[in-house]
Amino acid sequence: MAPYLLLRAIGFFLLMILGIPGNIFIILQFTYIKIVEKKLVPSNIIFSVMALANVLIIFSRIIPQSLNAIGVEDLLNDIECKFVIYSYRVSRAMSICATSFLSCHQCILIAPTTKVWIYLKRKVAQNIIGIIIILWIMNFSMYSYCFMSTNAKKNITTSPYTLHLVYCDADFLTYTAYIVNGTFYFIRDFIFVGLMILASSYMVFILLRHEKNIKVIRSSNKAQKWSAEFKASRSVILLIVLYVLLFGLDNSMWIYTLTLSNVTTDMNEIRIFLASSYAALSPILIIITNPKLHRSWMLSRKNKPFQKHIGNSVTVYSVSE
């Protein structure tokens, strides 16, 4: 195997190995918390949506890329290509929207208690599920063109305005359609990334001011409440930095491809790797920085019995903290 092919295979398999268990762990743990505690705070609901979108990205994009990297050919037919590319586009868009929504929600949460901010806090908390449903519907409806432009790769000549996506080709037929499509989604990404940057910048400002105030405020209850909120804000900022870095590189390459009349498969693979990296790396950051996941994991093991065999007898112990 050529060095480039080996490196590509290792890269995509690493994303798959990191991403699948990490995201599924987040979904299962928050589901467990919802069942046990009968509620889930808005930020953790958004984390669950992000994890679901990440799983869809891995299954629709990273797994096909991994299989192609080890030499599996002609994996998808026309219908499967349409479904896989549509799933990838929708889940990638939902990952962008959920991350942006998370940053805006956390920004509102730590904002000063003025009339406007209190109103926003109440409305967002009350309508968190509705907002997420709207985002899903919006992204489902935006990518219907995938069913018309995407087909499995065949030994036929395509137009110069075709994206070669490993097993599939997305043929836009005309230069106008190619540019309009690319520009439209770049603007969409730019808006949501812009919201992330504005929200995170405001959070950084509030955090810096909080660091000064916390030295003066010594009331234990208030300090603990502020500490939890601001620790959550720091983890959200880290997620945004990771997102902006990876998807910023992805979109920069996307803009570059708009200047080309025939984009190579290697170019698209680099873009896909960058865009998919967030789906694999973000759950690691979420698990490390989310104390609710740590407590849930410990509680689920708290009263788990274990057995010690002595001869033919069995002694049962109960593990507790």
Image: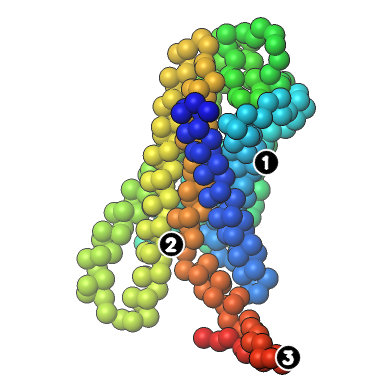
Mark number displayed over residue 137: 1
What amino acid is labelled 1 in the image? Ile
Q: Position of residue 143 (x, y in %)?
A: 66, 30
Residue topped by disc 3 = 312
Name the N-terminal-most of marks 2 and 3. 2
Q: Gap in Å between the C-alphas at discs 1 and 2? A: 30 Å
Name the N-terminal-most of marks 1 and 2. 1
Judge the density around disc 2: few (<14), some (14-19), many (≥20) Cα neighbours within 10 Å. some
Q: Is 85 on the left or on the right of 256, as rendered? A: right
Which of the two marks, 1 or 2, is nearer to us in this view? 2
Q: Position of residue 93 (x, y in %)?
A: 57, 38
Element under label 1? helix
Residue topped by disc 2 = 289
Q: Gap in Å between the C-alphas at discs 1 and 3? A: 60 Å
Residue that appears at 58% across and 86% down: 319
Which of the two marks, 2 or 3, is nearer to us in this view? 3
Dots 1, 3 in contact, CB < 8 A: no
What amino acid is labelled 3 in the image? Asn
Which of the two marks, 1 or 3, is nearer to us in this view? 3
Residue that appears at 38% across and 46% down: 241
Dots 1, 2 in contact, CB < 8 A: no
Name the N-terminal-most of marks 1 and 3. 1
For residue 249, what is the image quadrant?
A: top left
Q: Is 39 on the left or on the right of 111, as rendered? A: right
Mark number displayed over residue 168: none
Judge the density around disc 3: few (<14), some (14-19), many (≥20) Cα neighbours within 10 Å. few
Rendering colour mode? rainbow
Is residue 274 in view from this perspective? yes
What amino acid is labelled 2 in the image? Thr
Element under label 3? loop
Q: Position of residue 66 (x, y in %)?
A: 59, 36
